[in-house]
Image (spheres, rainbow, N blue to C red):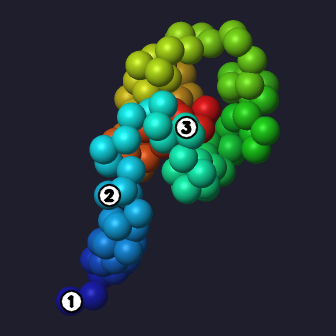
């Protein structure tokens, strides 16, 4: 009864159980509170490095065809809500939706980090 998909699902569930206590602590925090929490920023930095840096660069300065996140020129808007929407739902072009992959709390932490 073993399948790759089944093994993957077990590993995802195991990782989610391991991370749950950490994410639970962040669940009641606003984006502004997350931004000032060192533990949340450590997690957000890891989420960014694993999911965003490939396109936006480890320094968030982008590359050809991928926006610079370190300047004030925001294609879809630089408000917390606009950045949240970009990360959670994706945007036309090459920005995939990350909401289902990293969850609401993960999106909020990456928004705070960005």
Q: Circle 2 sits in a helix, a strand or a loop, which is it?
A: helix
Label 1 vs label 3, nearer the camera: 3
- Of the numbered discs 2 and 3, the one sitting upstream in the chain is 2
Q: Circle 1: is it few (<14), some (14-19), or many (20+) Cα within 10 Å? A: few
Q: Is residue 86 left or right of residue 64?
A: left
Q: Between residues 7 and 76, which one lies in front from this camera angle?
A: 76
Q: Which residue is mark 2?
A: 24
Q: Which residue is mark 1?
A: 1
Q: Is residue 29 left or right of residue 110?
A: left
Q: Is residue 17 visible?
A: yes
> Residue 38 at what x, y percent from top left?
60, 51
Q: Between residues 103 and 26, which one lies in front from this camera angle?
A: 26
Q: Is residue 28 left or right of residue 73?
A: left
Where 87 sits versus 17, above or below?
above
Label 2 vs label 1, nearer the camera: 2
Where 19 sits versus 76, above or below?
below
Residue at image point 31% right, 72% down: 17
The residues bearing labels 1 and 3 have C-alpha atoms spaced at a distance of: 45 Å
Q: Is residue 70 left or right of residue 84?
A: right
The residues bearing labels 2 and 1 have C-alpha atoms spaced at a distance of: 34 Å
Residue at image point 68% right, 44% down: 53
- Of the numbered discs 2 and 1, the one sitting upstream in the chain is 1
Q: Circle 3: is it few (<14), some (14-19), or many (20+) Cα within 10 Å? A: many
Q: Circle 1 sits in a helix, a strand or a loop, which is it?
A: loop
Where 55 sits versus 25, above or below?
above
Q: Which residue is mark 3?
A: 35
Where 102 sits versus 15, above or below?
above
């Amino acid at each position: 009864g073993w399948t790759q998909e089944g093994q993957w699902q077990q590993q995802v569930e195991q990782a989610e159980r391991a991370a749950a206590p950490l994410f639970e602590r962040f669940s009641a925090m606003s984006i502004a509170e997350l931004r000032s929490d060192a533990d949340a920023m450590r997690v957000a930095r890891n989420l960014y490095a694993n999911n965003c840096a490939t396109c936006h660069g480890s320094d968030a300065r982008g590359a050809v065809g991928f926006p610079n996140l370190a300047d004030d020129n925001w294609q879809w808007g630089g408000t917390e809500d606009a950045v949240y929407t970009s990360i959670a739902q994706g945007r036309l072009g090459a920005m995939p939706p990350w909401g289902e992959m990293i969850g609401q709390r993960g999106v909020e932490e990456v928004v705070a980090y960005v």
